[in-house]
Image: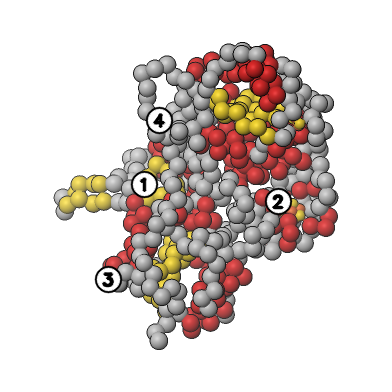
Amino acid sequence: MSNEHRSESPRPFRPDIVAFFCNWCTYTAADLAGTSRMAYAPNVRIIRLMCSGRIDPQFVLAAFRQGADGVLIGGCHPGDCHYQEGNYKALRRYKLLRRLLKSMGIEEERLRLEWISASEGEKVKRVINEMTEELRRLGPLRLAPKPQARRTRLVPVAGGVP
Amino acid sequence: MSKPKVGFYWCASCGGCEEAVVDLAETILKVVDAVDIVFWPVALDFKRADVEAMENGALAVSFVNGAIRTSEQEEMAELLRAKSQLIVAFGSCSHLGGIPGLANLHHQAGIFRRVYQEAPSVVNPENTVPQWRTEVPEGTLTLPVFHDTVKSLDQTIDVDYYLPGCPPPVKLIVGAVMAILENRLPAKGAVLAPDIALCHECPRKDSKPEKLLIKEFKRPHEMLTDSRQCLLAQGLLCLGPATRSGCEAPCVGANMPCTGCLGPTSHVKDQGAKVLSALASILDSNDEEQIEARLDDIVDPVGTFYRYSLPASFLYAHPSANGGPQP
Ligand code: SF4
Ligand code: SF4
Ligand code: FES
């Protein structure tokens, strides 16, 4: 999947969401939502990390470049992070990332952060459904196509460098 | 054996990289002794046709500076690729898109409007703007096509090595030339500079606290800068932690924060995201409102985080640059 080459389909737009979930809370909650058979929109790819503080902003931008219409970050509630302050770090990065996205012509709403504890399976469902609605309203993310780095030699080198 | 032939060329650049070659001072004599410079438009009177007449691979190495914006630059890059055994992307613009790459925030029409109509130094009552083709009685005149976006050199042709910097530090240039002459280059695709963050070679690194936390971001004109303490610790947006070393931190030496011209280390794919990450991490606040207020002090996030690397970044360009919705 890629945001550059996706053809328009006649079916209603089904946004792709990449979700980075903390192992200790939101991921467990998503699991709970799954085992208790709560229905949430099926268009989410969940990536588990040990803490929301591990989410490198590069992951978020790479997700957008590789086809995500939205990125969801889920972490432990303030004060509950297993590594003390990881979620606050995630919060600050998220705030700054939203500003960056806006300057780059991408709607800030495409990036969302939610605190979801392990018992809040219902909240996982609600947030994902809300976000899906929001992204439907925004439509597919259209990034400027990025030229690939060229990696083919035009001249075979005989004997290497002098 | 005849001396290896070398070419220099410039694309979308400011001329500073050519200046860096001159900065080699007497070292350039050693270089000139060892190689034959057969193409260097800024200094020697050889033309494109002279390069076209060469055999493929006749040049041992071409150093190409500048980003790629026009069809002519693309053609020259491709021509030099065919004629050269090695292509070295020389300087930030060629390496990552550089300052000209920030134009990827704007669309072509907006750039032309600004440059040929609105700029305070411009008088252009007839609204003359460059045309790709113009018919005159004598025939058709053409100019290179100005593309929608700016690319790095490796987004145009295959590049063998990169000499980073704006412009590349003399020490790195000499090191690269020697490595080529002595045939001890690293694996293809390498950036010819140490693969470690600038802070490691910064003279102020000892004053950078182990666990750095800052209350607010500042700009150099808003404060009296201490000339010994780590600039980041003083609240200045110093990009040393997210920038490759190799320059010996001349900017910090002049009491100015590093703006990141050497690009990231090989472990980082998107320099701006790394800068963003580092700055967000050290901001000493857990309160949402306070965080927002502090972030207001970063007035130009793209220009600060991607000063030299927007075309190489994940996001590449503002969608409007490619005809998407206008800002
Ligand atoms: S942040 Fe800047 S001033 Fe501080 S050690 Fe790193 S390069 Fe030097
Ligand atoms: S200190 Fe930073 S901006 Fe200055 S030359 Fe070095 S890498 Fe470039
Ligand atoms: S452990 Fe869950 S956010 Fe840090």
**Left or right side of B295 for B310:** left
Badge 2 and badge 3 both on one subunit: yes
Q: Do residues under tags 3 and 1 come within 8 Å of each other at their CB atoms?
A: no
- The label nearer to you, 1 versus 4, is 4
Q: Is residue B160 above or below residue B141?
A: below
Badge 3 and badge 4 both on one subunit: no
Q: Do residues under tags 1 and 2 come within 8 Å of each other at their CB atoms?
A: no
**Left or right side of A124 for B95:** left
Q: Amino acid type of disc 4?
A: Arg
Q: How is the image coloured?
A: secondary structure
Mark 1, residue position: B146
Q: Amino acid type of disc 1?
A: Phe
Q: Chain of mark 1?
A: B
The answer to which of B216 and B163 lies nearer the viewer is B163
Q: Do residues under tags 3 and 4 come within 8 Å of each other at their CB atoms?
A: no
Q: Which mark is residue B20?
A: none
Q: How many marks?
A: 4
Q: Residues within 10 Å of mark 2 (few under 14, many from 20)?
A: many
> Alpha carbon of mark 3 to alpha carbon of mark 4: how far?
43 Å
Q: Secondary structure at mark 3?
A: loop
Residue A9 screen position, x and y as percent: 37, 22
Q: Amino acid type of disc 2?
A: Pro
> Alpha carbon of mark 1 to alpha carbon of mark 4: how far?
27 Å
- The label nearer to you, 3 versus 4, is 4
Q: Could you tell which of marks 1 and 2 lies nearer the N-terminus?
A: 1
Q: Residue at x 53, y 82 (%)?
A: B30
Q: Secondary structure at mark 1?
A: strand
Q: Which mark is residue B241?
A: 2
- The label nearer to you, 3 versus 1, is 3
Mark 4, residue position: A6
> Alpha carbon of mark 2 to alpha carbon of mark 4: how far?
37 Å
